[in-house]
Amino acid sequence: MNHITRTFDILTNNEEHQPLKKALSIKKNGSWRSFSTQEYRKRVNLISYGLIEMGFTKGDKIATVINNCPEWNFIDMGMTQLGVVHVAVYPTISETEYLHILSHSEAKILIVANEELYKKLLPIFDQIDSLKEIYSIEKIDGVKNIEDIQLLGEQKKSKYKEELEERKSKVKEDDLLTLIYTSGTTGLSKGVMLTHHNVVSNTKLAAEFVTYLQYGERAFSFLPMSHILERTGNYLWQIKGLEIYYAESIETLAADMKEAKPHTFITVPRIFEKIYDKIIGKGRELRGIKRALFFWAVKLGDQFDPNPANRSAWYHFKLKIADKLIFTKWREALGGSIRGVICGGAALQPRLARAFWGAGIFVQEGYGLTETSPLISANSFAHPKVRFGSVGFIPDSVQVKIAEDGEILVKGENVMQGYYKDPEKTKEALKDGWFHTGDIGNVEDGLLFITDRKKEIFKLSGGKYVAPQIIENKLKESTFIEQIMVIGENQRFTAALIVPDFNYLHNWCSLHQISYRENRDLIEIQMVIDRYQREIDHYNKDLGHISQIKKFHLICEEWTPESGDLSPTLKLKRKVVLAKYQSKVQDIYKQS
């Protein structure tokens, strides 16, 4: 893979060495549409020819707000092989963020996925001088379409064929590939500058963790490709020669996955938790011996150890029975062919990792940031380079050291060039070549462990420090708890805001003949509050005195990016949540 130094070299390599009849596929109007490697190349070049005719030159910027689809790849490769910088923007951010990113990046055109995004972004487009046109992937009356650029390219391809090759040769590995604006949990996002070398070197590194995947196998893609984890994963699947499948919509995700039968996909813990909860929910609907066998298998999975030496012959025998009776159905729910899943973006509950490994699915938790392209460390698919609760081993090409205050510092080919047009914040983040991650952690036996975000650790009024993420991750093991935020900065004790798992809670209420009108009434019922207190008491036993939850409030609405409580990468916006529930927080800490 030494000849691959720029992202678009991946496509050239695939043309020559691992072409596919179904390189990219998407479900549309109930049927699959596939593009071969040859068709992929054709459309990429048509985009390039069209952009040359439109006057784009190296260093210009194009912004996209696009859902996962083959066209994302056509546009991405088509612009980057000209040296045009791809500004990939999340489809779920606020109008304030759109205005900031599109003006700050100085993008010349904006490409959107559909009519809904077009209508949302049109008023913002009118406020930004650098933006000259809006294009759409979906056909919209009166709006320029991405096919117009391809049609222009078709008309001009003979004119620009040699020029395209010349322009490609002038794109160097250290040239800027993309601006990715980090969502952040406070303030406006920063534009992370990543080069071709940053991303390609990280893609090659990631390939070392998935050697079990073979040319011609299938990957499923549903995390936003504006997310660096999914984007690097997208290049990874291509460099491995996998077929890539995209769902028709989030609503059809499960059904489309069953049809695509992927061997792998990328996810974040929040989605993984929902998959697990759905599987467990199906188990609860069973009766008699079937229910008993299901939860016997779950318990067996909870005991899984990746070190074969720690698994007895008797355990293996039972696991084979559990696999035949129960775990095959888990894999069928994910398409039936799944082997490995990459999980990142936040801490994964160790019990989930154990359960899925026990079910024959490698869940490879990793760690990284947008600023590191993203991979810093990851769990492998075999002992000894995997440990549940860690974010994996640190490869030789990435240097990691722990600062005196516990902060994780990183140096390597994967580290960004800096923040776009922001030298001060770049200096804060990059010191003597070391990127300051803002995460607190430690290294044991070459494995990296994350304990919390530096900025999220808070101090109680008595002077003791509390790391909220550790506590939250522990309490989310409860089947009663969907989401939780630990609070207590400058207060006398640690407390929490809890969003119940209402599906589970409703079933519990039915069993105990508790009646209610709606969720806001349900969370005020004393029997329910008492049940949550018992749950808190149970998990408090495993926490130090300072970290134990002394009081809590139940919240009746889920926290989502749309509600403004989570970032696009599903991280808690703690200040937003605190402000939103200020009265409940005050009630928790009022003098008794």
Image: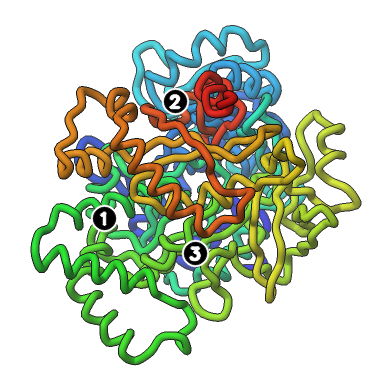
Q: Separation of disc 2 and disc 1 at Cα?
A: 27 Å
| Residue 370 appears in the picture as rendered | yes
For the residue marked with disc 3, what is the amino acid? Gln
Q: Separation of disc 3 and disc 2 at Cα?
A: 28 Å
Q: Mark 3 points at which residue?
A: 364
* Image x and y of residue 141, in percent: 34, 13
* Image x and y of residue 34, in percent: 31, 48
- Asked whether, in this view, residue 470 is left or right of residue 419, the answer is left
Kindly identify the residue that appears in the image at 78 percent across and 44 percent down. 417
Q: Mark 2 points at which residue?
A: 562
Relative depth, front residue between 473 and 42: 473
| Residue 165 appears in the picture as rendered | no
* Image x and y of residue 1, in percent: 62, 68
Kindly identify the residue that appears in the image at 51 percent across and 51 percent down. 473
Using the rendered view, name the quadrant where residue 504 is placed: top left
Sequence-wise first label, 3 or 2: 3
For the residue marked with disc 1, what is the amino acid? Ile
Relative depth, front residue between 198 and 548: 548
Using the rendered view, name the quadrant where residue 557 is placed: top left
Using the rendered view, name the quadrant where residue 355 is placed: bottom left
Q: In this view, does 61 lie above or below 447?
A: above
Sequence-wise first label, 2 or 1: 1
Bin the neighbour count of mark 1 within 10 Å (Cα to Cα): few under 14, some 14-19, many 20 and up: some
Labels 3 & 2 near each other (Cβ < 8 A): no
Q: In this view, does 354 lie above or below 426?
A: below
State the SS at label 1.
helix
State the SS at label 2.
loop
Q: In this view, does 60 lie above or below 38?
A: above
Q: Name the residue under label 1.
A: 280
Kindly identify the residue that appears in the image at 65 percent across and 20 percent down. 100
Sequence-wise first label, 3 or 1: 1
Q: Separation of disc 3 and disc 1 at Cα?
A: 21 Å
